[in-house]
Image: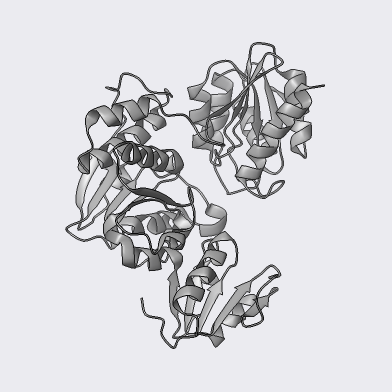
Amino acid sequence: MDFKNKKILILGFGKEGESSLKFLKRYYPHNEIGIADKQKIKGLPKKYKSFSGKDYLKAINNYDVIIKTPGINIKDLKLKKQILTSQTEIFLKKHKKKTIAITGTKGKGITANLIYKILKNAGKKVELVGNMGKPALDFYDKRNSWFVFEISSHQLEDLKMSPYIAIFLNVYPDHLDFFKTFNRYFTAKKNITTHQLKSDYFIYNKNFKKLKAIKTKAKKIPFSKNRGLKEIPFKSDWFLENINAAIAVTKLLKIKQGIIDKTIKNYKPFNNRLEIVGVFKDIRFINDSAATIPEATIAGLNNFDNIDTLILGGSDKKSNFKNLAKEIIKKKVKTLILFPITGEKIYQEIKKAKPKVLPKIIKVKNMKQAVTACYKYTNKGKSCLLSPASASFTSFINYEDRGNQFKEYIKKLAKK
């Protein structure tokens, strides 16, 4: 992509925006570059113009090229003749043929990590980029590597380029606070294959009719929750689907079955995803902070036995909690520790289901209160699961911050 003699605006200056500036400084050092973000921008060299505050989007009128970061709504942009692009698109224009991209409402991180580990164990040069790893443009100069790219609906929404291998794991209603309708959310997700060519591959979960019905030029490879695997670290259906997606990709790349099997057998969960923190005061603590939709929490409940205490709630993405309520009743969870805003909504769904015995509820405002309640109300020999079924932004910076605080207070309060 040639930006020669163009005035360029980075729209959004978080982790990805900072990476985009680093890229532009290297490849377009003589261009006029601006940065716009709703939050105040600190520490920029004087040569770069910055725009912040409630009117920060007006800055787009002064530039030729807009590099938009995920999370800024396209519908809020009033573009005239500006070129709208993104870090993902710039990266794919150079590295499409070596990119394996994974999307889906849940399971993206685990699938990306599995594929990465299998390829690495097979001796391939491989990098983990996107949401799971570093920003994609940090690897722009990398040669002769495969790139495993966890890619979100926000990154896909305005994408005009699709990867060589696209994987679509599943689709459930999510981010409806941002997209407003499920149809718009699903349309964004489909961009992972919309621009694929006949020489590309589309790997999809055949258990989802919507995914099966997607039309694409790429060669279609289905997968499902095949139960033929002998040794797996988790027992839930969704994890089986993650595994089978990873197998489909790595077999396509002609990786030996023995390497695939050994990697899966030895796979260990990573931070905030079904992560067993440990046993403290005879209580097992499990950190599944990345479970930001009800279906992910249902999977967490099905993956572990003896869940006595469940931490739920957070910011509202307009999810439907009816099936989660049924699962909590079915699993006979004794105590619910609830964060605002959605904690109360989940509890109301449980009440509507009219169980014989309602779980005990403890309402909390911060993680110290939540973990204190875990120690107080969880029976010895049982488990406490953090699996909020909601985004984290009411009380935490992000789901990682939420999970890290959970682990921090487990260890601190264990000493008392």
Question: Residue 195, position in %: x, y?
Answer: 28, 63
Question: Residue 248, position in %: x, y?
Answer: 25, 38
Left or right, 22 with respect to 99, comes to right
Q: Residue at x 41, y 46 (%)?
A: 104
Q: Quadrant of the N terminus?
A: bottom left
Q: Quadrant of the C terminus?
A: top right
Question: Residue 128, position in %: x, y?
Answer: 42, 49
**Residue 324 seen anywhere in this rendered image of the structure:** yes
Q: Give the answer, above or below, for where 19 lies relative to 415.
A: below
Q: Residue at x 58, y 68 (%)?
A: 12
**Residue 161 seen anywhere in this rendered image of the structure:** no
Q: Give the answer, above or below, for where 148 lies relative to 207.
A: below
Q: Dividing the picture into quarters, in which one does residue 106 lie? A: top left
The residue furthest right is: 416
Q: Nearer the viewer, residue 185 or 261?
A: 261
Q: Dividing the picture into quarters, in which one does residue 385 lie? A: top right
Left or right, 324 with respect to 166, comes to right
Question: Residue 46, position in %: x, y?
Answer: 66, 81
